[in-house]
Structure formats: structure tokens, C-alpha cells
Image: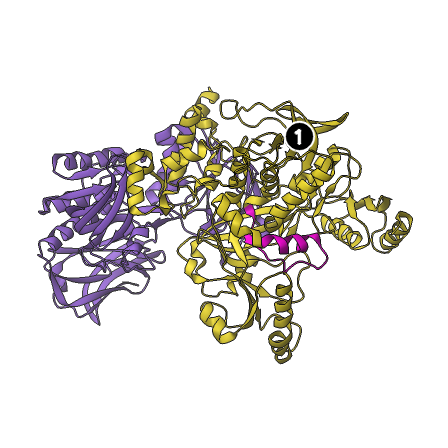
Amino acid sequence: MIDVDVAVIGGGPAGLAAALSAYRNGAKNVWLLERNPELGGILPQCIHDGFGNFIFKEMLTGPEYAQRYIDEVKKTGITVKLNTMVLEMGPERLIAVNPKDGLLDIKAKAIILAMGCRERTRPQILIPGYRPAGIYTAGVAQRYINMEGVMPGKKVVILGSGDVGLIMARRFTLEGAKVEGVYEIMSNPGGLTRNIVQCLNDYDIPLHLSHTIVNIKGKKRVEEVTVAQVDSQMTPIKSTKRDISCDTLLLSVGLIPENELSKMADVAMDPITGGPVVDEAMETSVSGIFACGNVAHVHDLVDDVSKAGETAGKGAAEHISDKIKKRKVPVIVKGGRNIRYVVPQIIRNEDFDKRITFYLRVNDVEEDVKLVLLSGEKLLYKRKENVVKPPEMVRLTLLSKFLENVGNELTIEAQK
Amino acid sequence: MEDAKLKRKIEKLLNKEFSGIEVSIDDGIAHLSGELNSWNEVVELGHKVGKLEVEEVVNLVTAKEVKAERREKPGLKLPKKIYDPTLPKSADVVIIGGGVTGCFIARELSRYNLDIALLEKECDIGEGGTKSNSAQIHTGIGEHSGTLKKELCAKSWPLYEKISEELDVPYKKDGLLVVLTKDTLPKVPSFIANFVSRTIIAHVIKSKAKKVGDEPRIVKKEELMEMEPNLTDRALVAVLMPNYGIICPHRLTEALAENAVQNGASIFLDTEVIGISPNGEMKKVITTRGEIEAKFIVNAAGVYADKIAEMAGAKEFTIHPRKGSTLLFDKGVGDYVNHQISEMKLPQDPHTKGGAVLKTVDENINWGPTAIETADREDTSVTAEEIQSILKKYGSIIPNFSTNSLIAYFSGVRAPTYKEDFYIKPSKKVRGLINVAGIQSPGLTAAPLIAKMVADILKNGGLEMVEKESFNPIRKKSTVFEDLTLEEKEKLVGENPLYGNVVCRCEHVTEGEILDAIRSPIPALNVDAIKRRTRAGMGRCQGGFCGPRVAEILAREFDIPLEKVTKDGGGSELFVGKTKVSLMEGK
């Protein structure tokens, strides 16, 4: 059995930041376990720019952004284990395997979950038809083109306007492939506005809102897809069906936090975020197990992921040095009007940090709203927003002294 | 009935319902020709004639709405670098078709001192109906009395205990609950229906099950809800058939093929039969990989069985494809049911047992299959209507089941004849051709005895069959990392580090296992074959993470560029070329 202070599962942006932060906050023996042969998570395949605007005040590419953290990790005494898959997990205990060390039986005083997320696949959106080659999720196609140097197809239809799909529309076009169009079942785009502009508009790639794919043809390789407009109930309208000849269907239809290990450790889950319920130190319902980044909820920007990692790393370090004092009465954080979810879902530490950041998403697009923080009837804080959109995560940071006298419930809502 | 009389009887039917259709009778077999409007009419015609005292139906009637079958030109699909075996000049027995039936036959015949060659047109075994099979080991209760299907099924299911042990494939008996609900008799007033279900129908099912050797018992509602807490409240009573089992059809087929090869049989993938011609006492089988002389040909070609028979000059039956679609849910929801469950609804569709909710040997939940007639032998599409009908039908058996865990849906094509029974007999026209056709459910269950039947036919047909002393019925599966204890895992990785490299995150499949599959006696040649052998890519992410790694390993092992790697054989290449290729073309 190997004794460590903090074990971080996942060497993507969340895990890198968490490991560094745990180390810098005093944890001595920090292990970073990564299942890929390299650190960085999804970043090495994100060769476009737009990373690091908040943290480094620069526009970096994914690999550059990751390298900054990797370089920092290398300067520390953090133990990095690559090609290492965690097979089993319970409180304070991990079983992992890699080709070099064999089976690793690890006892950790604190564990940080940073496994990231995975892409939703075709069955989750029930697209009928055949199952030929040529159907890829956007992230998989990105890996193939940017890291393996192979082209998944030449004539592409994209379903879903999530950010990875938009980025890939541009990437395929730059590689000389024809992107016939992006089809989005919702009446609003799923990705960031800047990506709609820079990846579709700039390349004359049409975006068809309120459209979906109703059939896939081709027994061996995709030959054709059928698209249709949907009505307000999202039911395809028969008269609008149209066949498009193509060799590739790219899916960018959402991301799901990867929480198989969290469930194994009986961590309480939030059905809306798909991730563990966490407090402001990113600690889960199981003492000593922390969760950060896309494992907790899916983020838009890597900077926020790194920030969450920092918080979790600090939390883990303080957990093992017994610095954290729990509040007598924890505060339950709830989303009110037009709020889909808020993270953290609970506040339960005293003096954890000077400020506290809430991450939230709205249900519907709304203009000219006030985001308010309420404790019962009492207004604690408000902020004006010109527009709020489901794909764009809202960050609300306030000094923790604001919360000194809250009761046991806090509501965040969007008021008209 | 004599042919002339039979002809008059059929003509009467045709005049009444299917004008313009011609019939002729040849040795008890009805041959139909002409044209109808829809494919459903063609099938209906075949079934109606099949119900009469004909031995089989050759239904060559076309449908106006159906375009002529578009067949790919036969030819080798895989580059020589990936797969290049040499076909022998001759064999005692050539088996056409590497589904579960063909592989069972190959294994059965490998008990004898015979040269056996099995030819499979796809790039893997079990690529047809086998891979989409519902995996149930039936007891025969659902079959009509007097059919060969029922007879073989009832005698065959008890063999599976031994077969699964010999071949080291997972098999379990969850038992089947046939549930009678408030909707079992929809057209009868409910108080009568409830009474009839509890008193009469349950007992009829029980006595039927006894006849096929099962040990059924009637389960009253209270106990039923304890056994299956998530069952619909509409349930009234159920009959438990404890001997209903489940197996993995693909692992079984793979094990059979391996064991056959181990015992001297040869199996050729990517080898399509394109012609059969008589050559004295022998028959010449012409394939995309060359010619082979055979004393006997066993036609186990599934949906193409009639085409193969026709190639040999024996039009004796017609296959009408009937597809079945299934929804597959992730592991981890497996606790939701403890038995196979089907809801009885009367009247029943005569051509399907109606499907079931069941838990696979890997603890995934399966809903399905459907039963839909199709003119296309390779129609493995799943339609929106099918998905909705499955969700509705099975969602009402176990309500509150979260369908979010759906990870795949697929379809397979059954290969029934119009008599809707197995057709296992020597050809009437062509000596040395044995047709093993019409193998539909419960074909998987009956396969061990189908194979024995074929061996008997060969013996009676004059093939000298001497049992080999060296025959070894035992086959060991290759390593499954996930199934090992921690100590075993540690030891294994110590011996071979490749078992410590987890490639598939969802199912914990290691590089070592993938290499085992590629190097097995029936090599896995593509991404889907690896998925079926090892489960890599079968989990919740459906190959999102491991797909690129598996493709890389295939490219490395076969020493081919990545863009030559296929999903499931030639034509299903994963990539169109290297990056920048489209840009170059533009120049």
C-alpha cells in the first residue's frame, strides 16, 4: 500500500491546477494520476486559440495553456503517473493500474476527482437509421485530425451547435472538407457567440436552428442523412424532410460529466449538473473527496476549470491539515427563477476563503435581467445583466462576508 | 397431397386474393411468380401459401414498390496485408456461412476425421443475424406444436450447461416470467379478462412449459412484486419458467469457431461464394478467394441461403427477411430486473414470441426485438417508429426505468422461409447439397442439435465419418482483465505489462486483451470485431475514448496506415485519408 496525502484523478486542466494548488497549500505527497500517455486532458487536441484570457490575460492555444501548468508541476515534487487508470475507489483508497508499476494500491488522505467529461453519443439523442462508419462525436474527430493526422471525412454534416462542433466546422473547412451545415434542434445556438461568429459566419457555414437529423443512410459508410425542421414540441415536421448527401455526420450534442468512480465511492450526485454535489471548497458529500472541473459540471472556459481545480486543491490541503472549520448550519444554495443550476450547491465551511464564486446557468435566454442573491426575503446582492443565455455560464463572485448572516438557505434567481 | 391437387387449391386462393400470380408445383414445393403492389402483399401471399400442405414456398413474386436488390460486386474486401489465407483445393465438407449455425456445424464435424472448410463472406464470424440475436436460450414453449423448431429447441436447451462449460462462455439461467396483465386480453371486459388470465391462461402456459421440459410455476401478484419490485402495477399473475437462459451469441460463435479450428477445421473470412457448379462426384465452389472442390456443401448462409441453393441449381425455398431491432442500456442499471420478463398480449403475433426485457450476461439491459418484414436482406436500420414502439412497449412493463442509460440500438435480420420452420434437409435436386435454412428463433438454442442433424444427414448421404480420438471439446477463453481478482491482475501485469494498459475506460479492456483478439485463431480484423471480442467500445461512451487507440493498435499490428483501418470490413474505412489530402486535391 502506498500512502499519499492527496491523490488527484485526472491530469487535465482541473487536475493539473488541483495538484499544484494542493502542493502549494502545504500537502507534501501529492500524486497526479492520468490515464492518457500525456498530461493536459483534452487541451493537447485543442489547437485553436482562446484559452487563458482570464488567468494569463493572453489568448493561448490549448497545448500552450496546458504546458504552462505542466511546466509548473514539473518544478514541484508532485508525483505524476501516466497511462494510469483508476479501477476502483472508495473513501481514502484507490486501486489503479499502469504498465510500468502494475497494480497500485493507494491510500490517500484526500482524493480529488478531476476526470472531466465525455461526449453524448448518438443513442442518447435517438437518431434512427443505419450504423455505418463516418459518425463521430466532435471531440473524437478533433483528436483524429489534430493529433493523429487523419481526416474522418470530406463532406460533413454537423448536428448540434455545441462549442466543439463549431470549432470543428471551422477545422474541417480549413482542411479542405466541405461542411454542408450545422443543424441545431433548439431555437438558440448551443455554443458561445464568439464561436458562432468566428467558426461559422466567417466561413459561410449555415446554421439551421430548430432542425434535427431524422435518418442516417449507408450500410458501410455514411452516404446520406435526412434533416427536418422541428416544431415547438421538437417533433420533426415531415414536409420539411430533406436528404443531404455526405460521408460524415459529426455530433456535438452535449457533454456528460464522467462520474463512474464518484458513484463507486457513493458520492451524492446532483441530477441537474450530472456531477457530485459540492461545497465552496469543492468537497463532495464524502469527507475528503473533492471534485472539480467538468466532473462537477460542464464548463465553457478552461480558465474556470483551472480556478475550480485551485479551489479543490486548497480544500484538500486544508482538509488533511484539519484547517477547515465546518459551519454549525450549512447553507443550501438553490436556483430560483430561470436558473438551471448553481455550483456550489452547499456552503458549509467557515473562513474557507475571502471570496466565494458561484457558477450558474440559466434555463432560457433573457435580456435585461437582474441576478439576485436572496436569503429568505432579504436581498444580499444584485447585478444587472444585459443578456443571459443557457450556453454561457455566469460567474458570480462575492466576498464571503456577504454570507456571514445568511440562514440555512440561499437562493439565486434572475429577476425581470 | 399430390402436386396437381395442390396446384388447384393454391390457384383457388390466388384467384380470390392475388390475381395475376402464377403458381407451379414441383415435388411438393410451390413456385410463385408475378408482381404485386407492396412487399407486405408478397409476404402475405407467401405465408398464405405456406399454410397449405406445401413442403415449402419459392416466392419469386416481386413488389412494384421495391427496387431491384442492389448488391455490391463481390470481391475481396480486405487488403492482403491484413488477411491473406490460402484456400485449399478441396474439402470433404464446405460450410457456407459463419454464423452461430455454421460454426456449430463446423465444431460438430470437427469431431470426425474430415477436411472441413467454412466460408464466410464478411470480415468476421457472426456478422449476420447472430450478432443481433436476443441471446435467449428458449425452452420451446413459444413454438407451434409439430414444428421442427419446437422439437429441436425443447431437446437442445438442456445441452447448454455442458456446452458453456466446455467452451468457457458465460451462460446463466435467469428464468423467464411471462406476465399476464390487465392488458393481456384487451378486447374482453376487464373483470372477465382478469379472471380468465389468473385461472385459465396461466395454467395453459404452465402446461405448455412442462411439455418442453421446463419446471414452471405460477407466481401470484404479491410474490411477483417481491421478485420484480419494478414491474408494472398492471401485472396480475405470472408464470415463471426457471430454465430460460441467456448466453452471449457472439462469444459463443467465437468459441465454437476457435474450437473447430483447434480440432482441425479451417475458417475463411472475407470469402464470398459466387458460384457452385457440379463436377462429377464433387462440386466446385467458386469464391472470391479462388475455387474449392467439395464432396458435400452445407448451406448455412442465413438470409442468403436461398441464393446459395439457387446458385447450386436448387430452388426449393425462399427466405423473406424479417428484421428485429433492440435497445441496449448501460450496465449498472442491471438491478432493475431479476428475470427475463415478457408481457403476454393476446392475440399473439404468429411470427414472433414478442420479445422481452432481459439482462445480458454482461448485465446490460436489453429491450426488444421488433419483428418487421423487409425486402432488403441487409436492412439493419433502426427506424424512429421502432425506437418509439420499443420504448412504449417495454417502458410499460417496467415503468420508471430511466431510458437515459440507453447506449446503443441495433437491428438484425432473421432468415425465415414461408413455412416459418427450420428447413434442414438434403436438396431434392442437387446431390451433396444440404440446406440448413429458415433458421430463425429459436435457432441459437437449437443450433447444437441442428449441427448433430447435419452430421447425421452427411452420414446417411454416404460420407465416411470416423470419430477422431484427438478431438478436444475444451476451449479456454482468453484473458478478461476486468474479471480477475486484484491478486491475479497484479500477477498478470507483472508478467505482461500490456495488460496494465487500459485502453477502454468504460469496460476496462487492456491492450493485452486487444492483442489477444487480433492474434486469435479467428483474428479480429477491424474495430467492431475487437469490440465484439473484448467489449472495448461497447460501454457508455461507445468508443469515444478508445476508438482512436484501437484504430492505432490495428494499424500498428497489421502494419497498415491508419486510413486503411475499417469499422467492420472493406468499405467502412474510418478515414478518407491523411489531413491536407482534400487541400492537395483542390490544387
Q: Decide which of B12, B421 is in the foreground and name it.
A: B421
Magenta residue check for B33: no
> Where is residue B341 drawn, in percent x and y?
53, 62
* In this picture, residue B467 sits left or right of residue B296: left
Give the labeled residue for mark 1: B92
Q: Residue at x 51, y 62 (%)?
A: B395
* In this picture, residue B455 sits left or right of residue B84: right
> Where is residue B502 drawn, in percent x and y?
33, 39
* In this picture, residue B580 sits left or right of residue A230: left
Q: Residue furthest top?
A: B587
Badge 1: chain ID: B
> Where is residue B352 drawn, in percent x and y?
64, 56
> Where is residue B286 drawn, in percent x and y?
68, 26
Q: Residue at x 81, y 50 (%)?
A: B54
Q: Residue at x 53, y 74 (%)?
A: B220
How many numbered badges does the structure rendering display? 1
Q: Decide which of A253, A75 is in the foreground and name it.
A: A75
Q: Decide which of A112, B488 is in the foreground and name it.
A: B488
Res A185 visible: no
Residue type at mark 1 is: Asp
Magenta residue check for B155: yes
What range is drawn magenta here? Answer: B132-157
Res B271 visible: yes
In the image, the chain rendered in yellow is B
User: Local crowd at mark 1 within 10 Å, few (<14), some, or many (≥20)?
Assistant: some
**Rendering colour (chain A):** purple
Q: Decide which of B531, B533 is in the foreground and name it.
A: B533
